[in-house]
Image (cartoon, rainbow, N blue to C red):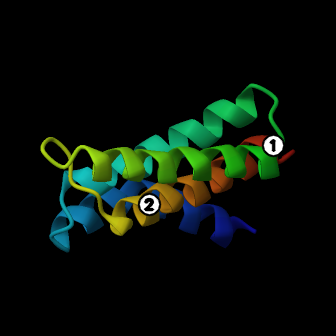
Amino acid sequence: MKKRICAMMATLIMMPYFCYASGIGPDKYQHAGAGAALNLGLQAAGVKKETAWCIAGAVFIGKEIYDARHRDRHTPELADIGADMIGLIASEGVIWILRKEW
């Protein structure tokens, strides 16, 4: 149990360093943060996990559709959706830790 908690927290803390070291850059890190914030916000508002994930997925896909339609100012990338999902999944670990009764 303690190993899982440490692994999740280390992942959240080290994510920016992994992004920069691998050349991914700040854009994907910002997408991961947005995905985590969206999931945390929806679930804090009382939305069920499955519904929050569906809403978040629609927002992620909608953002990339918007980017595709406005190529003069935005660049659509499937990797952005992947980064959003990584943030969403990481936020589930945070929610699990917060709801855990010690």
Query: Badge 2: few (under 14), some or many (20 or more) residues near its Cα, within 10 Å?
Result: many
Name the amino acid, label 1: Arg
Residue 99 is marked as: 1
Q: Residue at x 64, y 61 (%)?
A: 5
Q: Residue at x 30, y 53 (%)?
A: 68
Residue nearer the viewer, 1 or 31: 31
Q: Is residue 38 left or right of residue 77?
A: right
Number of marks: 2
Q: Position of residue 66 (x, y in %)?
A: 36, 44
Q: Position of residue 20 (x, y in %)?
A: 18, 63
* Quadrant in the picture for the N terminus: bottom right
Q: Residue at x 52, y 37 (%)?
A: 37
Q: CA distance from mark 1 to mark 2?
A: 27 Å
Q: Which residue in the protein does label 2 denote?
A: 81
Q: Is residue 95 above or below residue 45?
A: below
Residue, far top: 45
Q: Are marks 1 and 2 in contact (CB under 8 Å)?
A: no
Quarter of the view holding residue 55? top right
Q: Residue at x 65, y 56 (%)?
A: 93
Q: Nearer the viewer, mark 1 or mark 2?
A: 2
Q: Is residue 58 left or right of residue 70?
A: right
Query: Badge 1: few (under 14), some or many (20 or more) residues near its Cα, within 10 Å?
Result: few
